[in-house]
Amino acid sequence: MLAVIGLGTAAAFGIAVSLGGPARIAGLAAGIVAAASLVSLLPGLLHLKAENWGLAVLGASMARMLLVLAVGFAADPDGGRRAFWMGLVAGAVVVLVAETGLTVSTLQKLEREKRSSPAASGAGREQVQA
């Protein structure tokens, strides 16, 4: 996930610079994306049941997007507004897309493991007759 955060941060900086924003504005956009994206690490750090992990990722993703928008709104610079906001949104979207891919892949792996376990197939269960 740290690589995903780095990718989103680089995208925020790159887009802001490519749109003519000064390095200060691009750095601000990249810093906000990086800081807000740290929320994405919470589901991995918390010891959650597999059934709740996907919901925790969804909650962290929503929190990250709201943090990006709120901090971006509070730090809205005077010059280079278009470059700032486009960089901010592009970086956040890159993190969102990559995080979604990782999450789907992880959930599919957990589901395969769940189906292949002996408990899932019914092995070892006793039949109860009424």
Image (cartoon, rainbow, N blue to C red):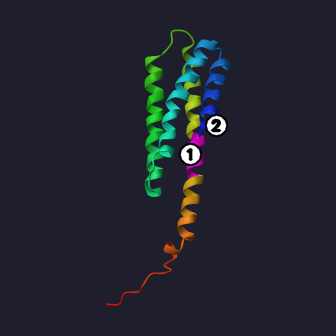
Residue 41, numbered circle: none
Question: In the rendered view of the protein, which quadrant contains the C terminus?
Answer: bottom left
Circle 2 residue: 3
Residue at x-position 53% and y-position 74%: 118
Closer-to-camera residue (98/124): 124
Closer-to-camera residue (66/31): 31
Give the quadrant of residue 87. Answer: top right
Circle 1 residue: 100
Which is the main secondary structure of the residues drawn in magenta? helix
What amino acid type is highlighted by mark number 2?
Ala
Circle 2 crowding by C-alpha within 10 Å: few under 14, some 14–19, many from 20: few
Residue at x-position 48% and y-position 81%: 124
Residue at x-position 57% and y-position 53%: 106
Residue furthest left in the image = 130
Where disc 2 sits, the SS reads: helix
Measure the alpha-carbon separation of dots 2 and 1.
Answer: 14 Å
The magenta span reads 97-104
> In the image, is 55 to the left or to the right of 83?
left
Residue furthest top in the image = 78
**Nearest to viewer (mark 2 / mark 1):** 2
Give the quadrant of residue 27. Answer: top right
Residue 25: x %, y % from top left: 58, 15
Could you tell me if residue 106 is visible in this image?
Answer: yes
Closer-to-camera residue (64/116): 116
Give the quadrant of residue 88. Answer: top right
Magenta span contains residue 49:
no
Residue at x-position 47% and y-position 41%: 42
Compared with residue 126, is residue 53 higher up or lower down, i.e. above or below? Answer: above
What amino acid type is highlighted by mark number 1?
Thr
> In the image, is 75 to the left or to the right of 84?
left
Q: Earlier in the sequence, mark 2 or mark 1?
A: 2
Compared with residue 17, is residue 56 higher up or lower down, i.e. above or below? Answer: below
